[in-house]
Image (tube, helix red, strand yellow):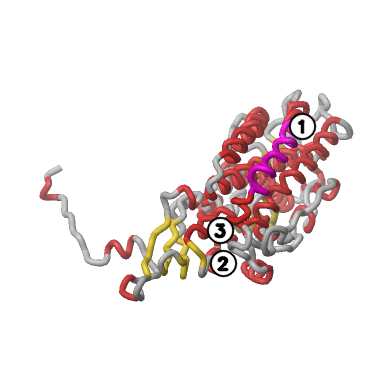
Amino acid sequence: MPTDRIQYKYKEGNLELSEPNKLKPENLRSEEMIINLGPQHPSTHGVLRLEVLMDGEIVKEVVPHIGYLHRCFEKHAENLPYNQVIPFVDRLDYVAAMSNEHVYAMGVERMLGIQEQIPKRVEYIRVLMSELNRIASHFIAIGTYGMDIGAFTPFFWLMRDREHILRLLEWASGARLLYNYVWIGGLFYDIPVGFEDRCREFVNYIKPKLQELETVLIDNKIFIDRTANVGVLPLDLAINAGVTGPVLRGSGLRFDLRRVDGYSVYPELDFDIPIGEGKMGQVGDCWDRTYVRYRELHESLKIVEQCLDKLTKEHGRTRDFDPQALVPKKIRPKAQDFYIRGEIPKGELGFFFRADGRNDIPFRCKCRSCSFVNLSVLPEISKGILVADLIAIIGSIDVVMGEVDR
């Protein structure tokens, strides 16, 4: 191409338009400075950009900038049949795809009015897979958080043990991370023969490892000093901001949709809801949020064991069991507005559907992502802290940018 046809023009202000800033250099006081943390920075847990106003080492204001990973989930969902949306649902919180699929499929099933017909074996398999995925998600949350603080060993341990879960999920679904396993009306396939025994082996293997994790990380004096009394999220602020999951429970409220809404077979299972108690500092600090996730690992293992008992006894495999027996050929719900929510590892995941009654493509599909809402409290709990504590607060919220930007 001739060079005379290419026109390179620089206009004053173009850079500001492409990188909008809330803070202006001309408004800075003496000793103040603006720094960018991210979007390419490991401690921001994804492509999150933070515009930070600093006074020396003290954080005066934090402005999160999102949108670097936007992949138009909602617009995709409004142009595809309900069943073809599931691979896109996987890519929201991509480290807990089974949980996302479970909530989405459950919502469409309720719109169709077939939720009571789903076989118990299918429901127990869904819960089993979701809880295994919850453990894997918390392994990432706790392991990467330890590395943010400076503890490398727990990260290597948890990534090693997470691999066992990924192999189990890959054995069942054929994929390591994005599964498309939970289908509307059933499952892609029954769990493989021998899956239950391998799961029990994993449960027996991981229990002593969690005790080691508590000793090396959770009760570590350096970890406690870095996280206790840091990033305290008061309960009233947590409720008003709409945060959910371990971030809310870390502030002392025993709110878990698996208990509150009692969906799927969770009402039939015995498990506790851990909350922050301020053991090492104040209720709602970074240590409490991490401790809640750690305690949830034990509770998820209890659920996994109960599911395995059900799947080998009352709802064991039979030759005539077909996990796709209720999968509809054409999904066309009645005209309605419908909202479904469920508890994924990071909090409440919700889907709002608007169906027109004539089409198998949703007229509207809106995703309520917990990472997006949880991130909204970051500016409020990050004022007047040291910049090193800002890193601790970001990690304790445990956001996944694929779900923030959806």
Q: Is residue 171 left or right of residue 24?
A: right
**Mark 2: secondary structure:** helix
**Mark 1: secondary structure:** helix
* CA–CA distance in space, label 1 to label 2: 39 Å
Q: Quadrant of residue 214?
A: top right
Q: Disc 2 marks which amino acid?
A: Ile
Instruction: List the single residue furthest toward the right.
Output: 314
Decide: marks 2, 3 in contact (CB < 8 A)? yes
Q: Over which residues does the magenta segment extend?
A: 203-220
User: Which label number is shown at residue 393?
Assistant: 3
- Disc 2: which residue: 381
Residue at 61% from the left image edge and 29% from the top image edge: 174
Q: Is residue 8 one of those drawn in magenta? A: no
Q: Disc 3 marks which amino acid?
A: Ile
Sequence-first tag of 1 and 2: 1
- Disc 1: which residue: 204
Q: Is residue 207 one of those drawn in magenta? A: yes
Sequence-first tag of 3 and 1: 1
Residue at 73% from the left image edge and 49% from the top image edge: 295
Can residue 301 be spotted in the picture? yes
Sequence-first tag of 2 and 3: 2
**Mark 3: secondary structure:** helix
Q: Disc 1 marks which amino acid?
A: Asn
User: Magenta segment, principal secondary structure?
Assistant: helix
Q: Quadrant of residue 65?
A: bottom left
